[in-house]
Image: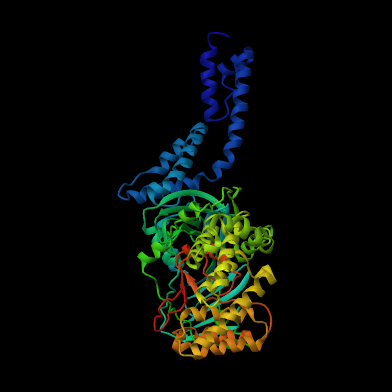
Amino acid sequence: MSKDCGRIRDEIAGLITDGAPNREAPELRQHLDSCPACRDYLRALQQEDALLGEHFATLEADMAQRQERLWQALEHVNPTKQTHTTFVWRGIMRNQLSKIAIAATIVIAAGVGIHHFGGRLDGTSVAWAGVDEKLSQVHDYFYREREIDSSGVKMPGFEFRSEWETWWYYSSIFGHRWDKYRAKELISQYYVLLKKQQCVWIHPDEKTFSCRPEQLPETAPLDPAGQIRQILAESYVKLGRTTIDGVLVEGVEVQGQKVGSVRLDNAVSRLWVNVETELPVWLEAEGKIHNSETYARVIWDKFQWNVNLTEADFTPAIPTGFTQKDWPTDNTRTPDLAVASAQKNVMVDFRPLQELGLLGSDQTPTQPPVALTGLEEIHAARDEVMSHWPKYADLRDSLRQQELDRKLNLKSSSVEKLVQLGVLLREKYWDVGGDFSPASYRYGYLARVLLEIAHERQPNDLGIGDELAETIMSTQTMSSGPAFWDVLRELRDAQFRQVRAEVDKGRRPVWEDFARVSDLVNLYREPAERLAVIDWLTGHAQAGGWTAYGELLEWMRTAAAQPGAGLGYSIYRPTGSEYPEEFRYGGRLPSFRGPQKRAVVPSRPLQPAPVQQPNQ
């Protein structure tokens, strides 16, 4: 390498960056002809320049647009500054290496400029302030709402879940409607008709419908546009980008914001918006339902904005044969919050059982958590667990003679003590897992033995009979076969005969009479027997204070005309237990109360309020 090579190579590098080197320059041509090293250097730089040019070609095509958007954004921030950018830009862009550096700068500016300048430089980022404006331009749309509720993991390792799906349709001209599904089965439809100022509610499961005229607001109470505005009005955290159903979206998250009709404590809400249209794609909220132990996640998705909804979409389609009934009213009494809170935390004192040696050392085995979704799945799992229990009839004698006689001396035990211990053992049964535990049956069976003995001693005590019926229903369900139906039919039939005789002699009927007698509408098989029970309940509704159950009795009358299995209806509502855990208590008779923590009350107001007589 000669002393001129360094200077020549600087000249070659400068020529490469400005364009192809002029090999006709006499000094450069003479040096290249005589210096193989500098010729190799020239060849290497030319190859590198070609490679850079190839990579830059795709970027340069979009450079002018990016440049213009950047300057527009800068001028928008400070429009008083007038700069002669075009000339400067052209001067800079004459150099190929400078082009690459400036291109990288523009790419970076485009990535951060959205948030710094409030604009959209590349057409792919959401200007959140504009989402509200986009929503205000939407007139007709529909979407799906899903609510997934969870009880959390309960002993012995089961999680109870429920899922509901509702499709909402909104029109600025015709009103709104929702179609609600459970397990993909349509269970109700609700129409709010603006032109007619009317609401229509259809219940396919009952084959009924209701209509109500009403002054209606033009905006639906669950309008998602309003919910989204609430989120964007809060201090939100940006979540960046992801893809939902093949759509590029950007998201934000807020803490503690109420979304939709479900009030959630410590809620977390997330909104995902289509980057291109700036319209919502996904909205969700999750947290504990207010004053509840149930965890809920609500999702709004499948949005279709500015669709063409017609009047036909808001015309109620009432099938032939559906019966019109009065509009349902919420006439249930809400328990005092302090009482309800105390009921949710019932602590049962099991010390008498411990002192008498009636608490075994066997524990329900632990297992990995199992999630059960919906009534059918929960009932199937429950029936599977209970099917592996030994039969009560096979254990009754040994439990009575070897367990209870030896520890309690049953012959000298009072009826009151037998009932007290029986109720405690039944609570212990629920405490260790109840109908979802492979080992809890022992406590339920012991409770049944004690209450059977008490009932044998005082067969006319209606309260003892009720506790025995409750215990039988705790350890068996309608799917248990004759062991359930035959025993309870005999017990409730005897009670009904006694109640009728006492009332005929002048005793005032009470709520407990309604509870025990209404079971027979399920337990009797013949329509004539069922209708006789309903007639008696209807005839004594005024005196007994259960006139609010008149509509239910009329429904029972229609359903009871057909012989067959049990009818599904409820006369109690829980104040200390919630769905989806409530599903586990299904498949029993209407009088079933469940564990004390469930804290049931009559589902309709009783007039006049009856005096509770649990041990009548």
Q: Nearer the viewer, residue 34 or 348?
A: 348
Q: Is residue 79 left or right of residue 568?
A: left
Q: Nearer the viewer, residue 485 or 580?
A: 485
Residue 319 in view of the camera:
no
* Image: 392 above or below 111: below
The picture places residue 112, in percent across and down from the top left corner, at 43, 44
Residue drawn at x 58%, y 60% is 446
Q: Residue furthest left?
A: 80
Residue drawn at x 56%, y 8% is 2
* Image: 500 above or below 61: below
Total count of labels:
0
The picture places residue 469, in percent across and down from the top left corner, at 57, 71
The picture places residue 608, in percent across and down from the top left corner, at 39, 84
Q: Nearer the viewer, residue 398 or 84?
A: 398
Q: Nearer the viewer, residue 200 or 399?
A: 399
* Image: 158 above or below 164: above
Q: Residue furthest top?
A: 2
Q: Is residue 389 left or right of residue 197?
A: right
The picture places residue 552, in percent across and down from the top left corner, at 53, 83
* Image: 170 above or below 5: below
Residue drawn at x 36%, y 53% is 235
State which quadrant residue 86 falls in. top left
Residue 481 in view of the camera:
yes
Q: Is residue 515 left or right of residue 114?
A: right
